[in-house]
Image (cartoon, grey):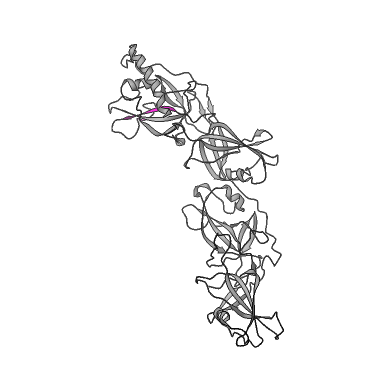
Amino acid sequence: MKSCSRWAAVLAVFTSWMLAGCEVDKAAQPWPHAGKLPDPGVSTIPLANGYYKGRAVQYWDAGAATPAVSNVCVLYRKGSNTPIPFDQQYPIVDAVVGDAAYSPFRHVIKVTVPASYVANTMTSIADLVNALYLDPALPVFTYTAWDAPSVDENATLDGSSEAPMPVWYDGRIAFVFRFADNDVLVNRNTGEVAVSEIIEISRSGEQLAGNTIFSVRKGDQGYSPLRRETIVSVTEAYPVSGPAPWQSLTAAELNIGAFLVERTETETLVNHPIKSVGTYTLVDEDRGHVDDSDPALYPAGDIPERLAWYNGTRRSYFDLGTDSGVASEVWVLYRTGLDTPIEGQSPIANSVPGDTTYGAARRVHRVYLDPSAGYTPNSIKSYVTLLQLGATEEVRQVWNAPAVHRDARVDGQSPRTGWARGQSFDFFLFEEDVNLAEGGFGVTFMPTFEIYRQRDSADQEGEWQDYNSLVPSVPGGDSYSAFRDMSRILVAPAYPDTAWRSFFDATTDPGIPTGYKVSTFPVSGIQNRPMRQ
């Protein structure tokens, strides 16, 4: 382990002191033993701004760093599970700025001292070894490292009133800023801290301040304040004022907005501990209402209600016309921990009629947003923007939600409103189960017969017989689907109205001369005909 290898050198130094008769005499050398270490020249750590999954981030720029760790010894009195308060016993570090082994990431070593121990008696690693409190061959490493860069005694931390923390180094006092809620796990195999990713936006060769994009935040799995930079060069069209169009790694990876010129992955590592993650800042422009003037795409007025036969009983259905049978997508926003959608937020669809990906059947994605992040309903009006939030998703159901004209009505009820690419559109939601075909890209279809009666024996087209659709199932049935695979049955002129009252009647009719069936042929296009429940 790399952290352990350094202790051999410490032990060697301590042994040489002992041989030379240089053991520290605490009684003869009262605290503080050797004063304060000279300041390293770090007078301030600046605060900067960025984004994390559509939310504002403030972080400190603590400069360059590496995954290597130095060490810090934290003292515990025997029998206690908490360290001696740091304002009584300063932590003891083994490296500061200027040392070859210096790293702001300090692997924590737990050192147990007697219950009677007087705070700040130990002021160096050598003291701990000399007192037999620390075995340099078997230090008690914890799993974490502090992010605690060395700073001047009077250094300032932008955006904070916190003063530097005193530590002991080789018998003298030094100072660090400890970013207490940015502790990072140490890999026990490599002895190094993890590296996370950030993106810096560059336009015309200059990095844009306030546009740093973080991949993880405090509390996320794999979080580390040590970041590897990727430089993303963008076109002059990328705005420099107001909220950035890219506020997540997803945006930069998907080239949202077509600003990308090139991506350059660097080996530059920086220490950027996060101060805070704020509220959602993404806001889509309201681009008005979709053009729903084509009735072939957007059914208008009163949606026709018709009747069909099922096993001798009449069942009513709504005729929404032709559908692609494609399963499209819709996102419904929830606050984490709640089982009801965010009030006032319209669903967000990926497509509307006229798009090749449109279908009335929509896989419903539940998207959970952080309730503490201050999301304002209908701020997001596009699924592309929604992707930037990187929120937890799960697919719970499939809707039958055909888009319609804004003046369409079902039972006198107006449609609901949704969003697609920043534009509003209207849709009806029929409360029925929709089953996806294998692979999930389309819906299952239900065969349906429509009866056309010949005007005379030479008529090969026939005349549609209203109220003479025949279906094999209804809502709740195993084979039911609102999406119908239609077939036309041509029957003889002698066919009496409602002679067939079930799907079975038509399939068992022997045809002319003893029956009525003349021919059966499929009708192109899937029809969306949800039944009244």
Magenta run includes residue 82: yes
Q: What is the residue that sits farthest to the top in this orientation?
A: 20
Q: Is residue 400 left or right of residue 12?
A: right
Residue 226 in view: yes
Q: Which one is in front, 67 or 54?
A: 67
Residue 206: percent from the left, percent from the top? 66, 33
Image-quadrant location for residue 243: top right
Residue 475: percent from the left, percent from the top? 52, 72
Residue range (magenta)? 68-86
Residue 121 in view: no
Magenta run includes residue 405: no
Q: Quadrant of the N terminus?
A: top left
Q: Is residue 324 left or right of residue 311?
A: right
For residue 375, above or below residue 401: above
Image-quadrant location for residue 417: bottom right
For residue 328, above or below residue 218: below
Residue 321: percent from the left, percent from the top? 65, 70
Residue 287: percent from the left, percent from the top? 67, 54
Give the tally of numbered discs: 0
Image-quadrant location for residue 108: top left
Q: Is residue 133 left or right of residue 477?
A: left
Q: Which one is in front, 469 or 510?
A: 510
Identify the residue shown where x is 71% and y is 82%. Answer: 459
